[in-house]
Image (cartoon, grey):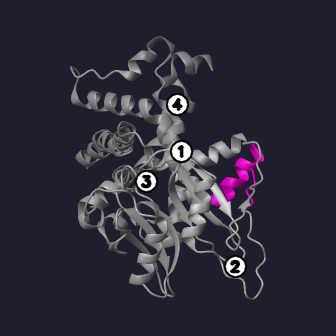
Amino acid sequence: MSTFLDRPQSTLFRRALFQVHIWVGVLTGLYIFVVCTTGAALVFRIEMQRAMHPALFTPARPGPVAHPADVIESVGRSFPGQTVFGVDAPTTTRPTYLAYARGDTRLLTLLLDPVDARLLGELPDRSFVRSIQELHFDLLAGRTGRIVNGLGALCLLAMCATGLIIWWPGRKSWRRGFAIDFRRQWRRVVWDVHSAIGICTVLIIAIWAVTGLEFAFPNRFRDVVNAISPLTVARTPDSRTPDSEAVHLEWRTLVDIARQHAAGQHVARVVMPSSPTAAFLVMFSREQPTPAASGDLTSVYLDQYTGASLTVPTARRTLGDTVMAWIAPLHVGGFNATGLRVAWCLLGLAPPALFVTGFTMWWTRVVRPRLMST
Protein backbone atom coordinates (compact mmCIF):
# COMPACT_ATOMS: atom_id res chain seq x y z
CA MET A 1 0.00 0.00 0.00
CA SER A 2 2.84 2.38 0.83
CA THR A 3 4.38 1.73 -2.59
CA PHE A 4 1.11 2.55 -4.32
CA LEU A 5 0.62 5.75 -2.30
CA ASP A 6 4.11 7.04 -3.12
CA ARG A 7 5.05 5.38 -6.44
CA PRO A 8 1.80 4.08 -7.98
CA GLN A 9 3.28 3.71 -11.49
CA SER A 10 5.59 0.95 -10.27
CA THR A 11 2.86 -1.36 -8.92
CA LEU A 12 1.54 -4.35 -10.83
CA PHE A 13 -1.97 -3.60 -9.52
CA ARG A 14 -2.04 -0.20 -11.23
CA ARG A 15 -0.62 -1.59 -14.48
CA ALA A 16 -3.29 -4.29 -14.56
CA LEU A 17 -6.08 -1.78 -13.92
CA PHE A 18 -4.59 0.46 -16.59
CA GLN A 19 -5.14 -2.30 -19.17
CA VAL A 20 -8.69 -2.89 -17.94
CA HIS A 21 -9.39 0.83 -18.17
CA ILE A 22 -8.00 1.09 -21.69
CA TRP A 23 -9.88 -1.84 -23.18
CA VAL A 24 -13.20 -1.17 -21.47
CA GLY A 25 -12.89 2.41 -22.71
CA VAL A 26 -12.05 1.38 -26.27
CA LEU A 27 -14.84 -1.21 -26.46
CA THR A 28 -17.56 0.97 -24.91
CA GLY A 29 -16.28 4.47 -25.74
CA LEU A 30 -18.44 5.10 -28.79
CA TYR A 31 -21.52 3.85 -26.93
CA ILE A 32 -20.73 6.15 -23.96
CA PHE A 33 -20.17 9.03 -26.38
CA VAL A 34 -23.64 8.61 -27.91
CA VAL A 35 -25.52 8.04 -24.64
CA CYS A 36 -23.88 10.94 -22.81
CA THR A 37 -24.18 13.37 -25.73
CA THR A 38 -27.90 12.66 -26.06
CA GLY A 39 -28.31 12.88 -22.29
CA ALA A 40 -26.67 16.31 -22.26
CA ALA A 41 -29.06 17.48 -24.99
CA LEU A 42 -32.12 16.17 -23.11
CA VAL A 43 -31.43 18.47 -20.17
CA PHE A 44 -33.07 21.10 -22.39
CA ARG A 45 -35.78 18.80 -23.77
CA ILE A 46 -38.62 21.26 -23.13
CA GLU A 47 -36.70 24.12 -24.74
CA MET A 48 -36.06 22.00 -27.83
CA GLN A 49 -39.73 21.06 -28.05
CA ARG A 50 -40.73 24.71 -27.74
CA ALA A 51 -38.32 25.66 -30.53
CA MET A 52 -39.56 22.89 -32.85
CA HIS A 53 -43.28 23.26 -32.06
CA PRO A 54 -43.77 26.93 -31.11
CA ALA A 55 -47.52 26.87 -31.81
CA LEU A 56 -48.00 24.28 -29.05
CA PHE A 57 -46.23 26.37 -26.43
CA THR A 58 -47.39 29.90 -27.24
CA PRO A 59 -50.42 31.34 -25.38
CA ALA A 60 -52.73 33.51 -27.48
CA ARG A 61 -52.89 36.26 -24.88
CA PRO A 62 -52.09 36.94 -21.23
CA GLY A 63 -54.74 36.43 -18.60
CA PRO A 64 -55.80 34.36 -15.59
CA VAL A 65 -55.16 30.64 -15.79
CA ALA A 66 -58.18 28.62 -16.89
CA HIS A 67 -59.88 26.20 -14.53
CA PRO A 68 -58.54 22.62 -14.95
CA ALA A 69 -62.13 21.46 -15.59
CA ASP A 70 -62.21 23.71 -18.67
CA VAL A 71 -59.15 21.84 -19.95
CA ILE A 72 -60.78 18.46 -19.33
CA GLU A 73 -63.94 19.57 -21.14
CA SER A 74 -61.94 21.01 -24.05
CA VAL A 75 -60.13 17.70 -24.54
CA GLY A 76 -63.45 15.85 -24.36
CA ARG A 77 -64.93 18.04 -27.11
CA SER A 78 -61.89 17.63 -29.36
CA PHE A 79 -61.42 13.91 -28.75
CA PRO A 80 -64.77 12.29 -27.95
CA GLY A 81 -64.35 8.83 -26.52
CA GLN A 82 -60.86 9.52 -25.18
CA THR A 83 -60.29 9.28 -21.43
CA VAL A 84 -58.44 12.17 -19.84
CA PHE A 85 -56.33 10.89 -16.98
CA GLY A 86 -54.09 13.84 -16.14
CA VAL A 87 -53.80 17.61 -16.47
CA ASP A 88 -50.69 19.67 -15.64
CA ALA A 89 -50.90 23.43 -15.17
CA PRO A 90 -48.33 25.74 -16.83
CA THR A 91 -44.81 25.68 -15.40
CA THR A 92 -41.84 28.02 -15.54
CA THR A 93 -40.53 26.20 -18.63
CA ARG A 94 -43.89 25.25 -20.24
CA PRO A 95 -46.33 28.19 -20.48
CA THR A 96 -49.30 26.08 -21.66
CA TYR A 97 -51.53 23.42 -20.11
CA LEU A 98 -50.50 19.79 -20.65
CA ALA A 99 -53.10 17.03 -20.73
CA TYR A 100 -52.86 13.28 -21.22
CA ALA A 101 -55.65 11.23 -22.76
CA ARG A 102 -55.93 7.62 -23.78
CA GLY A 103 -58.26 5.88 -26.19
CA ASP A 104 -58.32 2.34 -27.50
CA THR A 105 -55.15 2.71 -29.50
CA ARG A 106 -52.62 5.21 -28.14
CA LEU A 107 -51.67 7.85 -25.62
CA LEU A 108 -52.29 11.49 -26.56
CA THR A 109 -50.04 14.26 -25.26
CA LEU A 110 -51.98 17.49 -25.71
CA LEU A 111 -51.13 21.18 -25.21
CA LEU A 112 -53.86 23.72 -24.46
CA ASP A 113 -53.97 27.49 -24.13
CA PRO A 114 -53.57 28.46 -20.45
CA VAL A 115 -56.22 31.21 -20.59
CA ASP A 116 -59.14 29.92 -22.69
CA ALA A 117 -58.28 26.17 -22.58
CA ARG A 118 -58.38 26.03 -26.38
CA LEU A 119 -56.64 22.97 -27.83
CA LEU A 120 -53.36 24.05 -29.43
CA GLY A 121 -52.44 20.64 -30.75
CA GLU A 122 -50.91 17.25 -30.04
CA LEU A 123 -47.26 16.63 -29.40
CA PRO A 124 -46.29 14.24 -32.23
CA ASP A 125 -45.40 10.62 -31.45
CA ARG A 126 -42.43 10.84 -33.80
CA SER A 127 -40.15 13.84 -33.54
CA PHE A 128 -36.48 14.75 -33.28
CA VAL A 129 -36.71 15.14 -29.51
CA ARG A 130 -38.60 11.87 -29.08
CA SER A 131 -35.95 10.08 -31.16
CA ILE A 132 -33.19 11.47 -28.93
CA GLN A 133 -35.12 10.24 -25.88
CA GLU A 134 -35.53 6.74 -27.31
CA LEU A 135 -31.86 6.64 -28.34
CA HIS A 136 -30.70 7.72 -24.89
CA PHE A 137 -32.95 5.50 -22.78
CA ASP A 138 -33.48 2.46 -25.03
CA LEU A 139 -30.91 2.73 -27.87
CA LEU A 140 -33.89 2.59 -30.27
CA ALA A 141 -34.30 -1.08 -29.30
CA GLY A 142 -37.04 -1.11 -26.65
CA ARG A 143 -36.55 -3.25 -23.55
CA THR A 144 -33.45 -4.92 -25.04
CA GLY A 145 -31.81 -1.53 -25.46
CA ARG A 146 -32.72 -0.63 -21.86
CA ILE A 147 -30.92 -3.77 -20.61
CA VAL A 148 -27.88 -2.95 -22.75
CA ASN A 149 -27.92 0.52 -21.19
CA GLY A 150 -27.86 -1.08 -17.75
CA LEU A 151 -24.78 -3.11 -18.70
CA GLY A 152 -23.26 0.05 -20.15
CA ALA A 153 -23.86 1.81 -16.83
CA LEU A 154 -21.89 -0.96 -15.09
CA CYS A 155 -19.04 -0.47 -17.57
CA LEU A 156 -19.10 3.28 -16.96
CA LEU A 157 -18.96 2.66 -13.21
CA ALA A 158 -15.96 0.37 -13.75
CA MET A 159 -14.29 3.12 -15.79
CA CYS A 160 -14.80 5.55 -12.90
CA ALA A 161 -13.31 3.15 -10.34
CA THR A 162 -10.29 2.16 -12.42
CA GLY A 163 -9.74 5.71 -13.67
CA LEU A 164 -9.67 7.06 -10.12
CA ILE A 165 -6.94 4.60 -9.15
CA ILE A 166 -4.94 5.17 -12.33
CA TRP A 167 -5.12 8.94 -11.88
CA TRP A 168 -3.41 8.87 -8.47
CA PRO A 169 0.10 10.35 -9.08
CA GLY A 170 1.45 9.84 -5.57
CA ARG A 171 1.28 11.70 -2.29
CA LYS A 172 4.01 14.19 -3.13
CA SER A 173 2.59 15.22 -6.50
CA TRP A 174 -1.18 14.70 -6.24
CA ARG A 175 -1.87 18.36 -7.08
CA ARG A 176 -0.28 17.78 -10.47
CA GLY A 177 -3.22 15.56 -11.41
CA PHE A 178 -5.49 18.60 -11.56
CA ALA A 179 -3.20 20.72 -13.76
CA ILE A 180 -2.77 21.00 -17.53
CA ASP A 181 0.65 22.16 -18.74
CA PHE A 182 0.13 23.49 -22.26
CA ARG A 183 3.87 24.09 -22.65
CA ARG A 184 4.50 20.37 -23.00
CA GLN A 185 4.32 18.16 -26.09
CA TRP A 186 0.79 17.75 -27.42
CA ARG A 187 0.62 14.09 -26.41
CA ARG A 188 1.34 15.03 -22.81
CA VAL A 189 -1.23 17.81 -23.00
CA VAL A 190 -3.84 15.27 -24.13
CA TRP A 191 -2.92 13.10 -21.12
CA ASP A 192 -3.23 16.08 -18.77
CA VAL A 193 -6.59 17.06 -20.23
CA HIS A 194 -7.88 13.48 -19.89
CA SER A 195 -6.67 13.24 -16.28
CA ALA A 196 -7.98 16.65 -15.21
CA ILE A 197 -11.43 16.17 -16.75
CA GLY A 198 -11.65 12.66 -15.32
CA ILE A 199 -10.76 13.51 -11.73
CA CYS A 200 -12.96 16.64 -11.68
CA THR A 201 -16.04 14.81 -12.98
CA VAL A 202 -15.60 11.25 -11.67
CA LEU A 203 -18.15 11.68 -8.87
CA ILE A 204 -20.95 13.04 -11.06
CA ILE A 205 -20.24 10.45 -13.79
CA ALA A 206 -20.45 7.69 -11.17
CA ILE A 207 -23.77 9.14 -9.98
CA TRP A 208 -25.09 9.05 -13.56
CA ALA A 209 -23.97 5.42 -13.87
CA VAL A 210 -25.71 4.42 -10.62
CA THR A 211 -28.92 6.29 -11.45
CA GLY A 212 -28.81 4.76 -14.94
CA LEU A 213 -28.91 1.34 -13.30
CA GLU A 214 -32.22 2.31 -11.65
CA PHE A 215 -33.75 3.13 -15.04
CA ALA A 216 -32.56 -0.18 -16.51
CA PHE A 217 -33.25 -2.49 -13.56
CA PRO A 218 -35.78 -0.64 -11.34
CA ASN A 219 -36.97 -3.62 -9.28
CA ARG A 220 -33.48 -4.90 -8.51
CA PHE A 221 -32.31 -1.38 -7.70
CA ARG A 222 -35.20 -0.83 -5.28
CA ASP A 223 -34.44 -4.17 -3.62
CA VAL A 224 -30.84 -3.11 -3.00
CA VAL A 225 -31.85 0.29 -1.62
CA ASN A 226 -34.56 -1.31 0.50
CA ALA A 227 -32.02 -3.75 1.97
CA ILE A 228 -29.83 -0.81 3.05
CA SER A 229 -32.61 1.54 4.18
CA PRO A 230 -36.23 0.30 4.13
CA LEU A 231 -38.42 2.14 1.64
CA THR A 232 -41.78 3.52 2.70
CA VAL A 233 -44.65 1.73 1.00
CA ALA A 234 -47.06 4.47 -0.08
CA ARG A 235 -50.69 3.38 -0.07
CA THR A 236 -53.00 5.61 -2.07
CA PRO A 237 -56.42 6.02 -0.41
CA ASP A 238 -59.53 4.74 -2.19
CA SER A 239 -62.96 6.20 -2.75
CA ARG A 240 -65.84 4.33 -1.20
CA THR A 241 -67.00 1.23 -3.03
CA PRO A 242 -69.71 2.52 -5.36
CA ASP A 243 -73.10 0.96 -5.75
CA SER A 244 -74.58 0.32 -9.17
CA GLU A 245 -76.11 3.81 -9.40
CA ALA A 246 -73.21 5.83 -7.98
CA VAL A 247 -72.10 8.81 -10.09
CA HIS A 248 -68.94 10.76 -9.37
CA LEU A 249 -69.13 14.48 -8.68
CA GLU A 250 -68.30 16.91 -11.47
CA TRP A 251 -64.56 17.40 -11.88
CA ARG A 252 -64.98 21.16 -11.44
CA THR A 253 -66.70 20.62 -8.11
CA LEU A 254 -63.99 18.25 -6.90
CA VAL A 255 -61.20 20.68 -7.84
CA ASP A 256 -62.98 23.48 -6.00
CA ILE A 257 -63.41 21.29 -2.92
CA ALA A 258 -59.71 20.37 -3.03
CA ARG A 259 -58.82 24.07 -3.11
CA GLN A 260 -60.45 24.47 0.29
CA HIS A 261 -57.84 22.09 1.71
CA ALA A 262 -54.90 24.03 0.23
CA ALA A 263 -55.75 27.66 0.87
CA GLY A 264 -53.50 30.16 -0.86
CA GLN A 265 -51.95 27.56 -3.16
CA HIS A 266 -52.40 27.00 -6.89
CA VAL A 267 -53.46 23.88 -8.80
CA ALA A 268 -50.37 22.27 -10.34
CA ARG A 269 -51.74 18.88 -11.39
CA VAL A 270 -55.00 16.97 -11.52
CA VAL A 271 -54.95 13.17 -11.65
CA MET A 272 -58.25 11.56 -12.62
CA PRO A 273 -59.46 8.35 -10.93
CA SER A 274 -58.15 5.32 -12.79
CA SER A 275 -60.94 3.04 -11.57
CA PRO A 276 -64.38 3.24 -9.90
CA THR A 277 -62.74 2.96 -6.47
CA ALA A 278 -59.72 5.22 -7.08
CA ALA A 279 -59.37 8.63 -5.46
CA PHE A 280 -59.43 12.00 -7.19
CA LEU A 281 -56.06 13.71 -6.71
CA VAL A 282 -55.23 17.42 -6.93
CA MET A 283 -51.65 18.59 -6.36
CA PHE A 284 -50.96 22.20 -5.38
CA SER A 285 -47.97 24.50 -5.71
CA ARG A 286 -47.20 27.54 -3.56
CA GLU A 287 -46.05 29.39 -6.68
CA GLN A 288 -47.69 30.11 -10.01
CA PRO A 289 -46.60 29.08 -12.57
CA THR A 290 -45.40 25.87 -11.02
CA PRO A 291 -41.59 25.73 -10.74
CA ALA A 292 -40.23 23.22 -13.25
CA ALA A 293 -39.28 19.85 -11.75
CA SER A 294 -40.77 20.87 -8.42
CA GLY A 295 -41.18 18.03 -5.96
CA ASP A 296 -42.60 20.28 -3.24
CA LEU A 297 -46.28 19.84 -4.04
CA THR A 298 -49.21 19.44 -1.66
CA SER A 299 -51.43 16.46 -2.47
CA VAL A 300 -55.16 16.42 -1.69
CA TYR A 301 -57.05 13.14 -2.17
CA LEU A 302 -60.85 13.22 -2.42
CA ASP A 303 -63.56 10.59 -2.64
CA GLN A 304 -64.74 10.93 -6.23
CA TYR A 305 -68.40 10.35 -5.22
CA THR A 306 -68.74 12.44 -2.06
CA GLY A 307 -65.83 14.89 -2.23
CA ALA A 308 -64.77 13.83 1.27
CA SER A 309 -61.10 14.34 2.06
CA LEU A 310 -59.21 11.04 2.22
CA THR A 311 -56.41 10.69 4.73
CA VAL A 312 -53.04 9.48 3.48
CA PRO A 313 -51.12 7.51 6.11
CA THR A 314 -47.94 9.39 6.96
CA ALA A 315 -44.63 7.72 7.68
CA ARG A 316 -41.21 9.00 8.57
CA ARG A 317 -39.10 9.56 5.46
CA THR A 318 -36.16 7.15 5.35
CA LEU A 319 -32.74 7.52 3.74
CA GLY A 320 -33.91 5.07 1.08
CA ASP A 321 -36.89 7.28 0.28
CA THR A 322 -34.57 10.27 -0.15
CA VAL A 323 -32.26 8.31 -2.43
CA MET A 324 -35.15 7.21 -4.66
CA ALA A 325 -36.57 10.75 -4.78
CA TRP A 326 -33.26 12.11 -6.10
CA ILE A 327 -32.68 9.44 -8.77
CA ALA A 328 -34.52 11.18 -11.63
CA PRO A 329 -33.46 14.80 -10.91
CA LEU A 330 -29.79 13.81 -10.64
CA HIS A 331 -29.87 11.75 -13.82
CA VAL A 332 -31.79 14.08 -16.11
CA GLY A 333 -30.86 17.44 -14.59
CA GLY A 334 -34.39 18.09 -13.38
CA PHE A 335 -33.69 21.35 -11.60
CA ASN A 336 -35.58 24.62 -11.62
CA ALA A 337 -32.36 26.71 -11.65
CA THR A 338 -31.19 27.43 -15.20
CA GLY A 339 -27.57 27.67 -14.08
CA LEU A 340 -27.66 24.13 -12.68
CA ARG A 341 -29.20 22.80 -15.88
CA VAL A 342 -26.51 24.47 -17.97
CA ALA A 343 -23.87 22.96 -15.69
CA TRP A 344 -25.50 19.52 -16.00
CA CYS A 345 -25.50 19.82 -19.79
CA LEU A 346 -21.82 20.80 -19.91
CA LEU A 347 -20.85 18.10 -17.42
CA GLY A 348 -22.70 15.60 -19.61
CA LEU A 349 -20.11 16.28 -22.31
CA ALA A 350 -17.26 15.17 -20.02
CA PRO A 351 -17.52 11.42 -20.87
CA PRO A 352 -17.44 12.14 -24.65
CA ALA A 353 -14.38 14.36 -24.07
CA LEU A 354 -12.76 11.56 -22.06
CA PHE A 355 -13.46 9.10 -24.89
CA VAL A 356 -11.93 11.41 -27.51
CA THR A 357 -8.79 12.10 -25.47
CA GLY A 358 -8.48 8.49 -24.33
CA PHE A 359 -8.92 7.12 -27.83
CA THR A 360 -6.34 9.61 -29.14
CA MET A 361 -3.77 8.41 -26.59
CA TRP A 362 -4.52 4.75 -27.34
CA TRP A 363 -4.23 5.28 -31.09
CA THR A 364 -1.00 7.29 -30.98
CA ARG A 365 0.73 5.14 -28.34
CA VAL A 366 -0.49 1.63 -29.17
CA VAL A 367 -2.09 1.30 -32.60
CA ARG A 368 -0.06 3.78 -34.69
CA PRO A 369 3.40 2.41 -33.65
CA ARG A 370 2.26 -1.11 -34.53
CA LEU A 371 0.94 -0.01 -37.90
CA MET A 372 4.19 1.79 -38.68
CA SER A 373 6.29 -1.23 -37.70
CA THR A 374 4.51 -3.60 -40.10
| Occupied quadrant, residue 175 | top left
Label of residue 165 in the image: 4
Q: Is residue 226 magenta?
A: yes
Please name the residue that numbered disc 1 is placed on: 157
Q: Secondary structure at mark 2?
A: loop
Number of the front mark, 2 or 3: 2
Name the element at disc 1.
helix
Mark on residue 28?
Answer: 3
Residue beneath the point at 44% across and 14% down = 173
Label 1: how many residues lie within 10 Å, few (<14), some (14-19) or many (20+)?
some
User: Foreground residue, 342 or 297?
Assistant: 297
Please give the name of the residue rendered at 31% of the width and 70% of the height, measured from the top-left corner: 127
Query: Residue at the spot x=47%, y=49% of the render?
Result: 293
- Give the residues drawn in magenta, as a range: 217-236
Q: CA distance from mark 1 to mark 3?
A: 12 Å
Estimate the x, y position of residue 144 in percent, counting from the top left: 52, 70
